[in-house]
Image (spheres, rainbow, N blue to C red):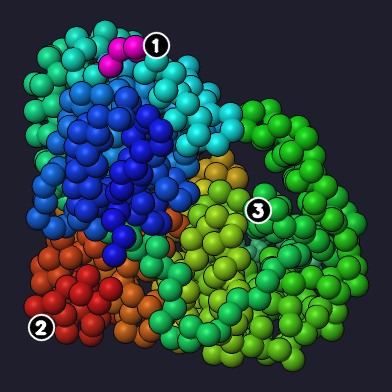
């Protein structure tokens, strides 16, 4: 076995190389090796200075996350950094790739830092519900000042070399080969008798109240509900108040507390869940994805333009097809407005925007699709329209082209049957706005082939999104669960809650908006039409009339008509007297006397109904594993990441308690949505958790 860290000498400079592919994660063997090689270097009389570098594609990109759930093994990372800092020789970090978390903290234990021009550094611990735990919160403010330290540790985003130079974190940028440049730099420093620079010996950092205020406000606004960001601010504040040794003690206490917290466990869980989501256990490993070099989008409406932008931004040439030149012009306008906005907001330079726009070719002629590798259809949600489109696609596209549909509610299998190649037809259910939302449900119809699934999954990954394979059913995974929750929100109000109360409870739980405000945003008319359709065509399954039907019939369709369930003050929902009237008269006609409903009942009914439906979805094999459902709800609907998703959260609450309440609601309401899911009953009977099925 090769050693994960090795020592060598190049003339008069000692070289410590971390070689632990793929990303030089700082597992226990690396930590041990670092201290051993440091010792060797210190004892090597021929070495005037030491350089620390990573082999392969990056300087250490962080801790080994798998060790978080195990007993800590020594040496700890703080001990390693302290060892580096106490080195009796000049120590120079040579950084390339992404020095993240512990990787960045190690560089702060060195005296000087040289970086490749495209290197990046960061402290992303916050994204896992943690804080930097190896001195990052104490050394970085001392080196760079409070504001840059907060910026890096609270936002958790890596920053590039020029900013790192401005902050004084990077001393020099390599111009040729990083290792050669680092060795030369070490020689130069040694020759000049450059001083050692242990950050741990510096006085506390200068306080910066304005920066602390600003970040406290930012956290309250943008990281509502997350515990770690405020803890990071506290740790950085400590670095301005106490001696280094005391600050390190405090950082360790806070770190251990975070590491053991429910939020960190949830965020770690979902981190792995997202990586596992694309894995399809039922597809043989030898099924390979087809290469996608060109794509087409059918329909330039809300979704089609968003999808075209996403594809173009990933570097794929896109052909955008509409039914006539007017609709095409409207689509073009939308694309132009989007890219102009990107330039105005300085997210993109004008040349890039022009190039992206130019990579989207509008057309009304299917002949232009003769040679595309993949098509995504996003026309009206109407089976006859989709049928016609797929018949055209079948006629004009190459036989091996993958044909995707963005339908939300139609049967992907029935759409596939319109073609001679149902094995190449797959659902690609994007969420709105498609260029922003990360989730795509990849829908497998019974005829969809392994290659189409693999190709779709590879494409979704390539465009920077998270794909979750799902089976065919009404609403797939996400919307099917959503519909159950929305029904509870409506029923709670019918029974006596106010729309404001329902929305407040879910908002306080951590959802980005309440269920009813969300409905106003999407438009109440869409689901109204769907209910009316069932009422007209399938009376035995007809949903009972509810007060939302009356709100819609009064012309209140949501935000687009300046009012739906709520009135709007700008974009802010406010209680609507008109809606209150509809609710009251609806109750009166139904003979319902409103009762007081406490917040706990709102919370239980809106969330436990989701857990129950999710269990049915799992039993039916519509989702492959509970963690996929968590990935869907976190990335498609804003379920709070720090709760790990509805399945992880349900395990925390306790499935037995949840089942008991589900039975209670079933007994008291008779609502079939509350019939306990068999899977939930089995798990409770066996004393198991949903997490056991992942
Ligand atoms: N809007 C959402 O939130 C959302 C989310 C997920 C999925 N979807 C699904 O995406 C699809 C499109 O929805 P949308 O909201 O973008 O609708 P939209 O009405 O905004 O756009 C549909 C576009 O399709 C075009 N079109 C209609 N018939 C056509 C044909 N025969 N050939 C070419 N173009 C044609 C229309 O001109 C229009 O521009 C639907 O299947 C919908 O269910 C929508």
Decide which of 636, 201 is in the foreground and name it.
201
Task: Identify residue for label 2.
Answer: 686
**Mark 2 or mark 3, which has the lower sequence index?**
3
| Quarter of the rendering containing residue 60 | top left
From the viewer's perspective, tell me whether residue 271 is left or right of residue 178.
Answer: left
Do tag 3 and tag 1 residues touch (Cβ < 8 Å)? no
- Image: magenta residue range: 192-196
Residue 363 in magenta stretch: no
Rendering quarter of residue 153: top left
Mark 1 highlights which residue? 192
The answer to whether the residue labelled 2 contacts the one labelled 1, judged by CB atoms less than 8 Å apart, is no
**Is residue 307 rendered to the left or right of residue 165?**
right
Residue 626 placement (x, y as % from top left)? 31, 71
Residue 314 badge: 3
- The nearer-to-camera label among 2 and 3 is 3
- Among the two numbered marks 3 and 1 on one chain, the one whose residue lies closer to the N terminus: 1
Image quarter hosting the N terminus: bottom left
Secondary structure type for disc 3? loop
Q: Between residues 296 and 560, which one lies in front from this camera angle?
A: 296
Helix, strand or loop for the magenta stretch, by majority: loop
């Amino acid at each position: 076995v090769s050693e994960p860290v090795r020592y060598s000498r190049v003339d008069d400079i000692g070289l410590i190389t971390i070689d632990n592919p793929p990303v030089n994660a700082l597992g226990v063997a690396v930590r041990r090796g670092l201290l051993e090689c440091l010792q060797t270097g210190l004892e090597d009389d021929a070495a005037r200075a030491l350089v620390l570098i990573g082999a392969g594609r990056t300087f250490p990109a962080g801790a080994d996350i798998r060790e978080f759930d195990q007993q800590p093994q020594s040496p700890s990372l703080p001990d390693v950094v302290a060892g580096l800092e106490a080195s009796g020789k000049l120590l120079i970090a040579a950084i390339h790739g992404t020095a993240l978390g512990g990787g960045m903290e190690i560089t702060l234990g060195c005296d000087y830092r040289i970086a490749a021009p495209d290197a990046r550094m960061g402290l992303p611990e916050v994204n896992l519900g943690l804080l930097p735990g190896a001195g990052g919160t104490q050394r970085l403010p001392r080196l760079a000042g409070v504001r840059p330290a907060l910026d890096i540790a609270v936002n958790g985003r890596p920053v590039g070399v020029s900013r790192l130079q401005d902050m004084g974190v990077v001393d020099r940028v390599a111009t040729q080969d990083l290792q050669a440049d680092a060795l030369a730099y070490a020689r130069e420093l040694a020759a000049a008798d450059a001083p050692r620079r242990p950050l741990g010996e510096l006085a506390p950092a200068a306080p910066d109240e304005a920066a602390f205020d600003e970040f406290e406000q930012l956290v309250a606004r943008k990281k509502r509900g997350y515990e770690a960001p405020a803890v990071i601010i506290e740790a950085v504040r400590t670095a301005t108040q106490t001696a280094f040794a005391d600050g390190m003690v405090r950082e360790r206490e806070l770190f251990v507390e975070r590491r053991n917290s429910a939020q960190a466990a949830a965020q770690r869980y979902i981190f792995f869940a997202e990586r596992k989501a694309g894995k399809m256990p039922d597809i043989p490993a030898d099924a390979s994805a087809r290469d996608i070099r060109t794509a087409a989008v059918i329909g330039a409406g809300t979704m089609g333009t968003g999808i075209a932008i996403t594809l173009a931004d990933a570097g794929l040439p896109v052909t955008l097809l509409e039914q006539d030149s007017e609709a095409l012009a409207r689509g073009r306008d939308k694309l132009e407005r989007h890219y102009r906005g990107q330039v105005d907001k300085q997210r993109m330079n004008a040349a890039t925007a022009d190039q992206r726009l130019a990579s989207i070719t509008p057309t009304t002629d299917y002949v232009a699709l003769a040679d595309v590798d993949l098509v995504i259809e996003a026309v009206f949600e109407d089976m006859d329209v989709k049928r016609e489109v797929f018949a055209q696609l079948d006629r004009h596209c190459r036989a091996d082209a993958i044909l995707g549909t963005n339908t939300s509610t139609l049967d992907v299998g029935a759409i596939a049957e319109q073609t001679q190649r149902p094995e190449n037809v797959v659902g690609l259910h994007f969420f709105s706005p498609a260029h922003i939302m990360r989730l795509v449900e990849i829908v497998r119809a019974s005829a969809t082939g392994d290659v189409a699934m693999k190709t779709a999954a590879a494409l979704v990954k390539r465009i920077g999104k998270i794909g979750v394979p799902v089976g065919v059913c009404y609403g797939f995974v996400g919307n099917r669960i959503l519909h159950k929750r929305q029904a509870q929100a409506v029923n709670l109000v019918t029974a006596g809650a106010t729309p404001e109360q329902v929305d407040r409870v879910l908002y306080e739980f951590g959802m980005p908006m309440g269920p009813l405000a969300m409905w106003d945003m999407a438009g109440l008319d869409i689901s109204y039409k769907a209910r009316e359709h069932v009422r007209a065509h399938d009376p035995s399954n007809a949903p009972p009339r509810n007060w939302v039907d009356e709100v819609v019939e009064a012309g209140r369709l949501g935000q687009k008509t300046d009012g739906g369930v709520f009135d709007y003050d700008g974009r802010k929902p406010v209680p609507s007297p008109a809606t209150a009237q509809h609710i009251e008269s609806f109750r009166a006609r139904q003979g319902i006397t409103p009762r007081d409903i406490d917040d706990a009942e709102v919370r239980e009914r809106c969330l436990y109904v989701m857990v129950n439906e999710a269990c049915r979805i799992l039993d039916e094999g519509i989702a492959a594993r509970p963690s996929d459902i968590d990935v869907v709800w976190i990335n498609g609907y804003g379920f709070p990441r720090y709760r790990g998703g509805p399945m992880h959260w349900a395990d925390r609450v306790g499935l037995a308690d949840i089942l008991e309440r589900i039975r209670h609601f079933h007994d008291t309401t008779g609502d079939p949505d509350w019939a306990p899911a068999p899977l939930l009953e089995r798990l409770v009977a066996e004393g198991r958790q949903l997490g056991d099925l992942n």
